[in-house]
Structures are given as C-alpha cells and as structure tokens.
Image (tube, rainbow, N blue to C red):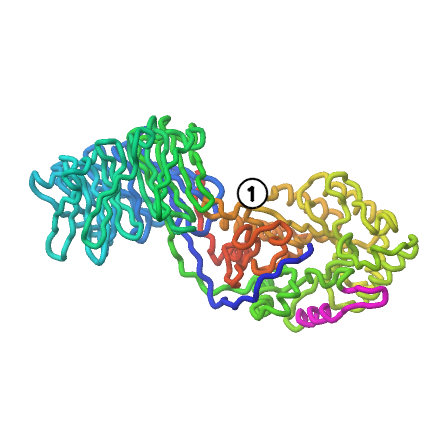
Amino acid sequence: MMKKLILPTLILILSGGFAFAFPPSAPQAIQAVTHDFLGTFQAINYTDSNGNIQRLEYDGDVWQTLQLTQDGSAAGSPIPFDNGAPNIVFRDTNGQLQLLTQIGSGWQQRQITQTQAEGAKSDPSIYQFGTIHIIYQGLDDQVHDLLLDGDELTHFVTTGGEAQKIAGTPTGFERNGEQHIVYRLQNGHINHMRYDGSTWVHTQISDPADPLSIGDPKVHFWGTQHVVYVGDDNQLHELVLDGTTWTHYQLTFGTAQRATGRHVGFGTDFENSSQVIVYRGTAGQINTLVFDGAAWNHAALDTEFAPSAAADTEFAVHESGAFHILYRSQDNRLQELVYSSNGWESYQPIFQETGVVSGSPAGYAHIATTNLPPTVPLRDLADARGIEIGPAVNRFAFDTDVAYKPVLAEQFNIVTGENIFKFGPIHPEPDVYNFEKTDELVQFAEDNNMVIRGHTFVWENQLPAWLEDGTWSQQEAIDIMQDHIAMVGGRYAGRIKYWDVVNEAMDDGTGELRPNFWLNTVGAEYLDIAFRAARAADPDAILLYNDYANSEINQKSDAIYDMIVAMQARGIPIDGIGFQLHITTDNPPNLDSVRANMDRFAALGLEVHFTEIDVRILNGFDARPNKGVRQAQLYRDLLTLCIEHPACKTYQMWGFTDAHTWIYDFFGGEYPVEAPLPFDPEYRPKLAYFGLVDALAPDHSIAYLPTMRHR
C-alpha cells in the first residue's frame, strides 16, 4: 500500500515494558472458560430480582456476566471499591454488611458487621482516607464508620444524639489532609462533619432559609467540593465549599426542570472542563445540566435514546475513557449513558434473558497493575518459533527519525520496503534506476541479520509517468516488464528471500482480473510473464502473488485460487500467496475461514504469508473502554494462527509505529483515532505488542494476557 503521511520525528522511549492486567474471577456458579484480556476493564455490579449480586465485566467486545452470591440475601445495592483487589460491600436482609473480595480465581464473602448495634439501615458509601472507610446510616440513625485496613476492621459511630440523627446514605471525602462527611439530617437540613485530628466538628451547612433536602446529598469535586441535593421544591440545589464557607445555589427552575428522583454529579477533564449533573426529571426522563464556566445548560434526553429511570434508582458514575452513568430503567433494565467530548451515547449492557436489576447498579473502572519484565524483542521469540516477523519500512522515517532504526533492528527479523522497490520509485525514467535507497535497506537488513521481502515487481499503482503515458505495443510492454524484473531482481539475486511478484491483480467484485495498465497493454498473460521473469532473475527467490481481501474464503479468494491452479497447470513458477490483512476491530476476519483458506492454498504446495497487517481501531473515541484490547487480541490470534499453520512462514505488518502509517492519510484522521500498529508514536509498546509476545512465547510461558472467564 502507498505510504503518504509522515508525522514529526519523535524521541525513542523503549526502556522497559509495563502494562495493566487483572486477575481472573470465577464465582462458583460460572463455568470457567478462558478468555484473554489485558488492560483497564469496566465492571458493573447489581442486585438481581432474586437478591443475588451479579457482576458484568466488559472485555472490549462484549459484556460477560458473573454471579457472585447464591443465597438471595442481598437487600441493598452493591458498592464496589478497590483495596489491592476488587471488593464489593452490600447490605443483607438482616441489616448486616457483607464484603465480597476477589482472591485469586474466586470471590470470598464475609460478614463485616456482627451485631444489631452495628446494623445498617442504608446502603453504605465508600471514601478513602489513608485506608478504606465504609460509612452508612446505622439502625440507630447515626453515622457509622467501618475502617478497613488490609483485612482488619474497626467500627466507629461518628455522630450522637437526636440532633445528629441522619436520614439516608452519608457521603465522605478527603480534603486538605482531613476527613469530611456530609449527610442529611432527619429534619431535611444538611450537616457537614470535619475530623480535626482528635474530634469530629459538626456544622449545619444548609441555611434555614434554604429548601430542605428530600434525598441524599451527593458530593463531587469540580475545583472544590460540590454538594448537590433535591430540595422540597423539587429543584436541584448546590452547596459549594469555598475555603471554609459553604455557599448555596439553585441550579434548576420551573416545571420543565423539576427533579423527581436521584442524581449524580461529576467534573469532566476534556475540552473546557465542565461540571455535569445527571438527574431523573419528570416522568423519569433523564435530564442533564452542564456548567461550562459561565452558565448552566439544561437538556432532557429523549426517552427513545435514554430510557426513563426508575423512581428509586440511584445514578452511579465512573470514569473509564469517558464518564459512564449507570441507572435502572422503569422496566428494571440496566442502562448506561456515556458522556465524552463527542457528547452522549446510550447503551443497554444486558437484556431480558440475562436477568432483572432490583437495586441500583454501581460501576467502576478497575485497574490492576502487574509489573512486567522489560520488553522482549519479538525477533528473539520469533526465531525460536521458526517464524519471521517484521514491518514494511517507511523510508522517510528510516532516514529522518532517530528512534526508528534502533527499534526496527531490535524487534524484527524481516523487513519490506513500503514503497522503494515499486516500479515508479526504483525506475523513474526509461533508462534510469534509483537503487540508492533499496541498496541501503538491503544492507541494513543484512547488517542486522534480517530477511528481506521485495515488494513489488508488478502492480497497477505507482507506475512512472513515462510508462503510463506512453503508447506501447504488446511486445514493447512485455519487454519493459521483463527488463525491469531482470534488472531489479538480478541486482539483489541471492539477497532478497521473497518477492511479491504481482500485487493486487484481482478485481474485488467480479472475480476477474482488474483492468490496469498491464492487463490493458499485455493481456491476461502478464502474470505468467512476470513470474517467469522473476524466476529467471533470481532462481532461489520465493515468488508470491499478493492481494487484499483474500484471507477468507470468498469470491475473490476463490478467483485467486482458480487463477493459481491454472498457472500451475501451465508450469508457471509460483511459490506462495500473500494475505494482506488490513483489518479493523469492528469487522475482524473469521479465523476459521482464514484457516480453511490457508489449508487449500497449502494443498497446492504454496507457502502462505501474512504480508501487510494492520488493525484499525474504528471509532477511536468510542466511549466503550478497551478497544486496544480487541486490537491486541486480533494481532495475537492472527499470529497464533500463522505459527500453528505449517504453510505460514512470515507475519508482516504494514509499519510498526503509529508515528508512521499510511492509514491516516488514506482514510483521514490522526492519532489516536484508529492507531493501527503495535507501537505508539513515542515507540512505546502498546497492548497489541503484548498480544504478539503472548502468541510467540513458547506454551504462553510469558503470560502478558491473563485470563478472564466467559459465562
């Protein structure tokens, strides 16, 4: 493919590999089936209609369902948090708090309150101050605090007396090295607690003239702490902490903006950084408020886009590439709204057959880290597996980017010239050949013990003007082709192992040869002539036909198969076929079909090469997390297929760093949208790199991609 786009020179950063991974989870009711996964993952927890805790984990492609409890004892909503491992706390039917902790390959449950005096009336909330604090409304209507320090639990009651009795769930936060808790008093006013190091200082922060709160206050951070609540006037109100002063603001007005349920707020970190509040409006419609620094902008999302919320549902928000707002709809389905710089998107992660949501969902983006060894040169692993792996070389980057050649030499054992061996660049005038750049690449490869693929003798594109604009007889065109192949192939005879003799000759939709200069001037026999000339120029080179959209069994690959069978019957020297595999995460190839296609070409005695791989991440700003995971899986799965198939000899990518790829110029866009290659623009290995390592490591002995269980 033609390479056009060049990004600026970048600095080499390739000292050591580091990636994110997470441990597998396997509740007893779920059959354990391995599924590879890498990176940040989004998890959603909810209580189903049977009183059991369910967990959804998003693997970058689909949602997987895990049932974490079996006894039907959950009475409240599950509240997730990280404490070195995923944890979930929930209230049971006896008013006691239960803790679920992921340990190794399973989940362990234990009761963390033991007596009536410690019992919970409300769902808990979590904040961190040195350690994990689980706070809740006790059965005595006081604020209770469970400190979870490692496995140790300490119980405190932080309020006392009638004047400090609370209603609903308190919320806590850390500010300026101090603990803070905000809660609703039973009279509807809002109290603030600050721990000064020795005692809790209580302050009523809502003015007697302010509307009373009829729901739990919610705290979010946007430059400072914002306490948002629904007043008894059914409007949203906000208390903002400025230094030590709380200031009241009314956020909504009138019937159209009326709040009839719960809400959640957060501050964005994209574009101009906005404060956002999502709440249940009239008849359950989802309303949004966005403060852009100057004014509040109100909108109501259409119920066809965002189904109406149940009256008692909480809204939960977590960040994973964008802001994910979870709620239960009026038909008791789990709904997800995603807010990013592209605006709002709506999803339904689970459907009728997977169960009904009883409580309020809660989600989070969990990142479990694993320190990995330094990046392993792919070529070392590939040599051990008897396979060649490498990229097409962008010549501009090769000449100008100081980071390019060191990574190229360290990581790969085969190279291809992206453009420099093509007819136009190497043969720009009738009697002129430009071998300077090809000589340099061949020498570089030999100096670094790398195999070379020549690409390509005959193609419809990148022909010089003198050839395309000329008027040639059939014999003159044949002579030009034969002379060109003899000159180029002969110069590098014994030095270039593979040649893509003819490239992309088959039409996409017709199953016929593509009309082009060579077909129009020479006729269909131009392929035979090219392969015979290539064999004469270099008797030891392995000669291939190369094309795109031919990796699966389809009309095009059928036509190519029939063409090669006929060529072999005529005695034409052809040794292999190249599958280009320019693919996308959203429309990957069917690997079973690729394997069957490889089998039939191998049965003809041909080698099968994967020649121009890149994996575009379509919708690069799609708010769903882990598009890079799917990309890594595709790189890994294709390489695994090649390693396991005896006919597959090479695995070549059309580039190796997102700093230099034809994708952006040809399809539009810029990094990080699509990001098709295993190294990022700063030459740091991406998830796709670790997918390649995982495929190459013998018996998967380097476990870069831990397992996740399917339902």
Residue 33: percent from left, percent from top: 46, 42
Using the image as rendered, state which of residue 330 and residue 34 is in the foreground: 330
Residue 308, percent from left and from top:
37, 29
Taking 228 as reference, is 651 left or right? right
Q: Residue at x 7, y 41 (%)?
A: 161
Can you say whether 606 is above or below 415 in the image?
above
- Asked whether 239 falls inside the magenta stretch, the response is no
Relative to 515, residue 481 above or below = below
The image quarter in which residue 50 lies? top left
Q: Quadrant of the N terminus?
A: bottom right
Q: Which quarter of the figure has residue 108?
A: top left
Residue under the image location 74 percent in, 68 percent down = 495
Residue 327 figure quarter: top left
Residue 420: % across, % down: 72, 63
Describe residue 284's horizontal placement relative to residue 533 as left or right: left
Decide if residue 484 is in sight here.
Answer: yes
Given residues 552 and 568, the one toward you in this image is 552
- Asked whether the viewer can see residue 489, the reply is no
The residue located at (68%, 60%) in the rendering is 418
Q: Amino acid at mark 1?
A: Asp
Classify mark 1: helix, strand or loop: loop
Q: Tell me if residue 444 is in the magenta stretch.
A: yes
Q: Which residues are magenta?
A: 426-446
Which residue is more in the foreground, 701 or 627? 627
List the residue tagged with mark 1.
Answer: 586
